[in-house]
Amino acid sequence: MTTLSDILVLAAAGMFVLGYLIINQVILRVMLLMGTGLYIWYYAVVADTPLWPAIWASIATGTANLIGLSNLFIRRSRWILPKRDIDIYPSFSALPPGDFRKLMLLARRENYSTNKVLTTAGAAVPDLYYVISGLVGVRKQGGEFYMHSGNFVGEVAFLTNEKASATVVMAEGGELLCWDVNQLRERAARDVRFRLALDAIISLDLARKVAQAGAPNATTVNELEKSV
């Protein structure tokens, strides 16, 4: 004869099995939380007196799971976006709001005037930049071209830890995000999630630049000068 305790333990085990088969972290944690609740119920009724050690152990694991679940919801909630940077989040929408917040907390938003040098070919790159608005001129291996807003500057040197391969100058004043390279590396070294988020957004930028390289509508410095 099947008893309540049998049903509870089988249902709890079923929740755990289903949870482990699910990739989605939120659903997985919800299933494990439900399974933990059923196990606690089981430990309370399976014997004449509640199995308190097992109950307290299950409460501890359930609490840890609940904290992790709360962190997942917070990391995905737009309300944690820094007010200063809400306007540029669409450009970084590949990142969850929590990862974007971490990245922006280390950033400075600064306005640069025309002819401001951002990187110099052959020199160390102390800052990583993201062009919010304005226009930058890139001089590399004898060639020159313009790069519009929505691009990183100095990302290759940051990733490779080498000197700049191009000289980049503000061709038109605008607003930039700036990160101290050493600060970024220190944070990435101690926070794996932050490093993955940073690598992901820079990789997307590099992929976009590769896709646009040599495109028919690519604008060189000379072509742009002729049009103004």
Image (cartoon, rainbow, N blue to C red):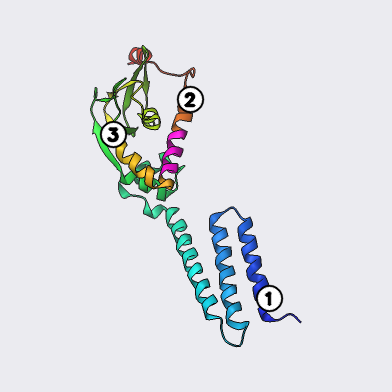
The residue most toward the right is: 1
Answer with mark 3 or mark 1, whichever residue precedes in sequence.
1
Give percent across and percent down for residue 78. Answer: 41, 52
Residue 66 visible in the snapshot: yes
Q: Does residue 62 show up magenta in the picture?
A: no
- Range of residues picked out in magenta: 195-204
Return the residue at label 2: 210
Please state which of residues 106 and 51 is positioned toward the viewer in this rendering. 51
- Our reading of the magenta stretch's main secondary structure is helix
**Image quarter hosting the N terminus:** bottom right
Residue at the extreme bottom: 48
Read off the residue under disc 1.
7
Q: CA distance from mark 3 to mark 1?
A: 63 Å
* Of the two numbered discs 3 and 2 in the rendering, the one whose residue sits closer to the viewer: 2
When the figure is inspected, residue 62 is found, relative to residue 202, above or below; the finding is below
Find numbered disc 3 in the image and state the secondary structure of the residue it sits on.
Answer: strand
Which residue occupies the foreground of this view, 74 or 191?
191
Circles 3 and 1: CB distance less than 8 Å? no
Q: Is residue 70 above or below residue 119?
A: below
Q: What type is the residue that disc 2 sits on?
A: Val
Label disc, if present, on residue 175 of the rendered structure? 3
Quadrant of the rendering where the C terminus is positioned: top left
Give the x, y percent position of residue 197: 43, 43
Q: Does residue 15 lie above or below 171 as drawn?
A: below
The disc labelled 1 sits on which kind of residue?
Ile
Q: Earlier in the sequence, mark 3 or mark 2?
A: 3
